[in-house]
Image: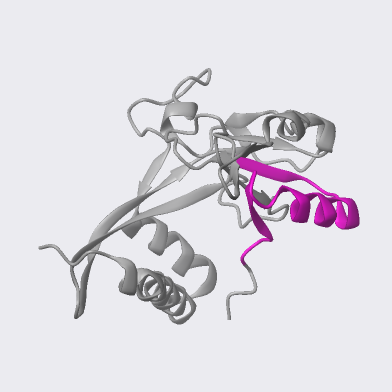
Amino acid sequence: MYDFIPTTFVLPREYAMFVEEFKRSGGVWIMKPIGSAQGKGIFLFSRLSEISEWRTDYRYKKGADQQKEADVEAYVVQRYISNPYLIGGKKFDPRIYVLVTSFSPLQCWLHRSGFSRFSHSRYSSDPRDIANNFMHLTNVAVQKTAENYDARSGGKWDIRSLKLYMISQFGREMVDELFWRIQMLVLRSLFAVQQVMINDK
């Protein structure tokens, strides 16, 4: 059901597995620091030499009776989705809010509102555009630094506008099914961590 999720590794812990996969299949990958926000530290690459510092930064320190990982900033590295669904030729992502009031029993609320963030530039899969964050990232903190950025709309649509546009393209039944599946993703994500969350109201 979730085979659309791109191949993903956590570096530096899974660096060797990542390199094996990269050498096997190549392509464009995206790296994101796990402890950052607003698009900071995110970049795309297509050659291992572009992240070669991992080979030297990732080392082991000898502990008393076991090896301990060196303190290196962790990144998530994923195969980049090269054929994203576009609106007006631009990438976007929906921002949907969920309030979890209890994990035991699980109780959560999906906010009716929300919005979608759009990239400033039209998407291109041309390798020469790999470093253009205005094309590949949708973070407002990145987009607002673009030339001709529209501060009034902020490169956003509310969820209602997104749904209406998609209904005009694909019909209500398909869009209802899409948002039902998004709700199921939310629930299954919460189920996945339910046993390890502290249930402190």
Quarter of the image for the C terminus: give it: bottom left
Residue 47 visible somewhere in the drawing: no
Compared to 4, does 116 lie above or below? Answer: above
Q: Residue at x 63, y 41 (%)?
A: 31
Residue 106: % across, % down: 23, 77
Tell me which corner region of the image, top left, top right, bottom left or bottom right, holds residue 194. Answer: bottom left
Q: Is residue 114 magenta?
A: no
Tell me if 20 is positioned left or right of 181 in this view. right
Q: Nearer the viewer, residue 32 or 90?
A: 32
Tell me if 104 is positioned left or right of 168 in this view. left
Q: Is residue 16 magenta?
A: yes
Give the extent of the magenta segment: 5-31
Residue 60 visible somewhere in the drawing: yes
Tell me which corner region of the image, top left, top right, bottom left or bottom right, holds residue 37. Answer: top left
Q: Residue at x 65, y 57 (%)?
A: 8
Q: Residue at x 73, y 40 (%)?
A: 124
Q: Residue at x 51, y 48 (%)?
A: 92
Quarter of the image for the N terminus: give it: bottom right
